[in-house]
Amino acid sequence: MKKINEDLLDAWLTVSRTIINERLVSDMPYNEARICNILYRHQRRHPEDRLTATRLCLETNMLKSQMNRTLSQMEKKGLIVRERSSQDRRNIFVSLDPKNAGVYIAQHTKILELADRVIEKIGKEKTMELIELLTTVSAIACEVIK
């Protein structure tokens, strides 16, 4: 087991390091890119459901103070807009600013091109297996952590 767990950890860290260190999203810091990705995906899949900073904290595992600081920086750059709920004034919704979403979308397209090249090299079948394995590993890791 010792050799396998070291190999798994090494592979896991290598993939993470490659994605982060290659700076695929070079126009913005990593946490901003993560938040933009969550907002972009969510707005496309569930346009009727709006996200709050609290939900973004749950998605990213960022501390509330770090999230607020990052969202403030993103708001100054015009990447996001925050809007207070008309039903519950305590809720503030966060969304990508449609006027400047192109900054993230261009980076997102660049990342998808990398994914396409990986799929091309390993094939669609192995990619589907990899997606299933990574999803399973993530779920199990979250379960074990709790």
Image: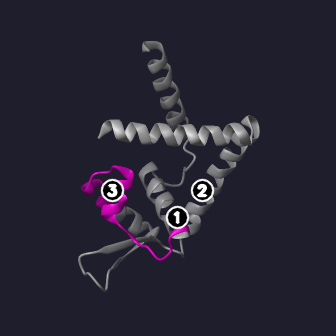
- Check disc 3: other Cα within 10 Å, few if <14, some if 14-19, many if 20+: some
- Give yes or no for residue 56 being in the magenta stretch: yes
Q: Label 3, on which residue? A: 57
Please say if 118 is above or below 6: below
Residue name at image x 61 percent, y 38 percent: 130
Tell me if 47 is positioned left or right of 74 in this view. right
Judging from the image, what secondary structure is the residue with disc 1 in?
helix
Q: Which residues are magenta?
A: 45-70
Residue with the mark numbered 1: 40
Disc ID at residue 112: none
Which image quarter holds the C terminus?
A: top left
Residue that numbered label 2 is attached to: 108
Lower sequence index among marks 1 and 3: 1
User: Which secondary structure, mark 3?
Assistant: helix
Give 33 or 6, whichever is nearer the viewer. Answer: 6
Marks 1 & 2, CB-CB < 8 Å contact: yes
Q: Is residue 132 above or below residue 25?
A: above
Taking depth in this image into account, of 44 and 77 the one nearest to the observer is 44
Rendering coords of residue 50 (x, y %) = 41, 73
**Which of disc 2 and disc 3 is earlier in sequence?**
3
Question: Does residue 50 appear left or right of residue 87 in this picture?
Answer: right
Residue shown at 72%/40% (left/top)? 125
Instruction: Give, as a three-letter code, the residue at label 2.
Output: His
Mark 3 and mark 2: Cα distance apart in space: 21 Å
90 to the left or right of 114 = left
- Between the residue at mark 1 and the residue at mark 2, the CA separation in whole angstroms equals 9 Å
Residue 44: where, in percent of width, then height?
56, 68
Q: Residue at x 54, y 67 (%)?
A: 45
Q: Nearer the viewer, residue 97 or 135?
A: 135
Identify which amino acid the numbered label 3 is placed on.
Answer: Cys
The relative height of residue 62 versus residue 143 in the rendered view (above or below) is below
